[in-house]
Image (tube, helix red, strand yellow):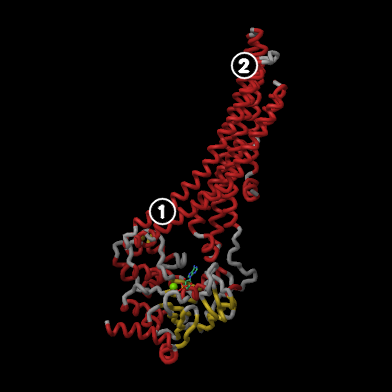
Amino acid sequence: MKLILTYIRRHIGLFATALFFLTVEAMADLLQPAFMARIVDDGVKNADVSQILRYGAIMLLIALAGAVSAVVRNIFSSRTSQLISKEFRSDLFQKVQTLSLENIDRLQPASIITRITNDVTQIQEFINGCMRILVKAPITCIGAIVLVVIQTPQQIPMLIAILAITSALIAANMKLGYPLFGVMQKKLDRLNNVSREFLSSIRVVKAFHAESRETEKFDTASYGLATASTSAMRVMAVFSPLINLTVNFGVVVLLWLSQHQNSMEIGRLMASVNYMTQILFAMGMISNILNTSVRAMASANRISEVLNETPAQKSPDAPKRPQWRAEITFDDVSFAYAGAGKEALNHISFCAKPGETIGIIGPTGSGKSTLVNLVPRFYDATKGCVRIDDIDVKQIDEEALRSAVAVVPQKALLFSGTILENLRWGRENATMDEITRAARIACADAFITRTADGYETRLGQGGVNLSGGQKQRLCLARALVRNPRILILDDCTSALDAETEAIVLSGLRRHLQDVTVLLISQRISTVRKADRILCLDDGVVQGFGPHTELMTFCPTYQAIYHSQIGGEKNG
Ligand code: ADP
Ligand code: MG
């Protein structure tokens, strides 16, 4: 609630204007029946036409004022709620950009999407609802109660009874509804998660002919959401008519009682009945806004979860380095993913000298990607420390760190847009010469120029219209455009044929002599020419040294060697 108030406060002027017009509107509604009573009791009873006309004209004016206020209030309230929800969305988006991968792992991307879309909409509806009824319901309610008391004072006990019953009903409604709406939102997260997973792996799904399994998963999630929504709505469905019934029952009682009280004037009775209906409306509106508020609170909580995430801490006195020697030191580093039982990296220590190429080899799941992700601080070491040129990476200015380190991830990720735009991602102001040079080193230039539009060729989302090897080469070129001091290649030549891979690797050696390279692969042939090789198994260093040395001293490396080179000979 505090969160919502903070955002409302930014537009307090608009909000207050809407509330002002709302007050006028409520007053207008309240005055109508009182004048109606006058027309009937003074005008009609005494057959006084001039009285009727006079009160009629006043009623018309009041109605007009009410209508104009309603229009103006609507304009202001929709503008305010739209503005506020826009700000919620931008703030969330900006916040997500500052989060580390660890934060995002915990929050889950699908859930972040639901928060930016659905949860913000819930709050928008609540704010809009507030400006429709916030002061109107209390004014109408209290005003109508006072006026009923004035018009027909005998009815006070009945009025109290009705108010007590409706309040109890509304309270019960809230209590039952609140948890159900929370469940509903969770189910929506789940549904989004399933859809997202399916869409991002649609090729695998089709290849394995697993559509029916996916449909089943989707149906389960969809059914879950439907069930949760139904039970939440069922609570509403029971309570709103109950509240209506109570107030209408009150009207009946009022009419029935007045039968025995002839003293009551007919106009006043009409006005009282009218006010009872207004109380009914006000109660309905209150229970409505309370329902929306329950949902909005649940949503606000989910949004503050994102806004309150503490991103990887930037260090305040972070030294800026114009030129790195690019020496990487791992000093007794251990790392465990949040929520994972066991450590993915165990007491890793090694040093990569400036300009050195370090091969990293090990079976899948041995922790190779995890290890290199600690260098650009995608994750932070749980124990020990990672240093570049003897400075703890946690002490390095984030921007300086990211511009010194380029990563070619295991999964080749490209964006929709032209090839040139994708390469420029590396560095906005790179010249065409620098770009083609990078593309040549990555062996991408040849296939790019062969396409009809060359560097202007448009890529579909994620680069769907390229082969795996082509995507990998573009990602490598994009990293090279950056002119990094440290280059991390996470198994990014796996889709290349042996010949092209050899050309790419020798090109890198020739052109990037002073760049420190961490070269991950599962293949001996890829890493054997590296200056030194780190052999990793189950998060533990098995050996570190040049190929020949590991062949003599590291049994794990020997085993990998024999399984691969031996296999090639036999095959
Ligand atoms: P490699 O790159 O050598 O194949 P990884 O570094 O990707 O291995 O993974 C090392 C271990 O950490 C594996 O057991 C894997 O299941 C686990 N792991 C990887 N990424 C995550 C993650 N985001 N959350 C939790 N565990 C992870
Ligand atoms: Mg990996």
| Viewer-closest of 144 and 158 | 158
Q: Residues within 10 Å of mark 2 (few under 14, many from 20)?
A: some
Where disc 2 sits, the SS reads helix
In the image, residue 345 sits, relative to residue 225, either above or below, namely below
* Ligand 2 located in image quadrant: bottom left
Badge 1 or badge 2: first in the primary sequence: 2
Q: Point out the image quarter for the C terminus.
A: bottom left
Disc 1 CB within 8 Å of nearest ligand 1 atom: no
The spot of residue 395 in percent (x, y) is 61, 73
Amino acid residing under circle 2:
Gly
Q: Which residue is mark 1?
A: 218
Answer left or right for 139 relative to 67: right
Amino acid residing under circle 1:
Phe
> In the current view of this chain or complex, which residue is farthest to the left?
571
| Viewer-closest of 205 and 565 | 205
The spot of residue 241 in percent (x, y) is 55, 33
Q: Quadrant of residue 276?
A: top right
> In the current view of this chain or complex, which residue is farthest to the bottom?
552
Per the rendering, the mark at residue 56 is 2
Residue 456 seen in this snapshot: no
Task: Please name the residue shown 61% across and 58% down the image.
Answer: 308
Where disc 1 sits, the SS reads helix
| Viewer-closest of 257 and 465 | 257
Q: Quadrant of residue 160?
A: top right
Task: Please name the residue shown 46% across and 77% down the image.
Answer: 366
Residue 88 seen in this snapshot: yes
